[in-house]
Image: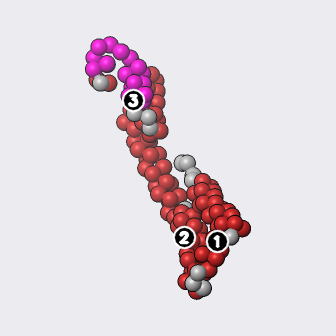
Amino acid sequence: RVADRLAVGHSIEEALGEIVERLPSRELVVLVSTLVLSARAGGAIVGSLRNLTVTLEQRKETRREIRTQLSQVTVTAYLVPVIGLGSLLLVNAMMPGALDRMTGAFVGQVAVIVSLGLFALGFVLIRRLSKIDV
């Protein structure tokens, strides 16, 4: 499509601007900006693309390192509710019928619902705090 638009007489900025609208991506925006600036200034496109390649590789590596560093936080986010439910089931296994007695009373039902809500809130908060946009 870009080649067709260029062949019809559109400027390189218009032709590449359409591809950015169709394919929203940070890397693509940077590529298009580099190509447009090089075309305007008459600069060396090869050198610009080489620098862009290095920069994008560094960003990819940075994302990979961040994901590795945050893997423990991700596991913790999933373990918080699992430990809560597991401890509830463990109490019921150690004292058969404890879960029935606990949920039989209104206060016990409220306590279980509140604790499940707090575990869900902990999961959401840990996941949200560990989300880093690079």
Circle 1 packing at 10 Å, graded few (<14), some (14-19), many (20+), is few
Position of residue 56 measured from the top left corner of the image (x, y, whole percent): 44, 46
**In the depicted structure, whether residue 62 falls above or below residue 89:** above
Residue 36 showing in the rendered view: yes
Query: Which numbered disc, 1 or 3, marks the residue that appears first in the sequence?
Result: 3
Position of residue 51 measured from the top left corner of the image (x, y, whole percent): 44, 42
The kind of secondary structure the magenta stretch mainly shows is helix
Which amino acid type is shown beneath numbered disc 2?
Val
Labels 1, 3: front one: 1
**In the depicted structure, whether residue 53 falls above or below residue 68:** above
- The disc label shown at residue 9, or none: none
- The disc label shown at residue 104, or none: 1
Residue 130 showing in the rendered view: no
Q: Are marks 1 and 2 in contact (CB under 8 Å)?
A: no
Residue 77 or residue 88, whichever sits in front: 88
Position of residue 76 measured from the top left corner of the image (x, y, whole percent): 57, 67
Question: Is residue 46 rendered to the left or right of residue 105?
Answer: left
116 is within the stretch colored magenta: no
Position of residue 68 measured from the top left corner of the image (x, y, whole percent): 50, 63
Circle 2 packing at 10 Å, graded few (<14), some (14-19), many (20+), is few
Q: Which residues are magenta?
A: 4-22
Query: Farthest bottom residue?
Result: 94
Query: Which numbered disc, 1 or 2, marks the residue that appears first in the sequence?
Result: 2
Query: Farthest right residue?
Result: 107
**Residue holding disc 3:** 22
Labels 1, 2: front one: 1
In the rendered view of the protein, which quadrant contains the N terminus? top left
Q: For mark 1, give the secondary structure.
A: helix
Which amino acid type is shown beneath numbered disc 1?
Gly
**Residue holding disc 2:** 82
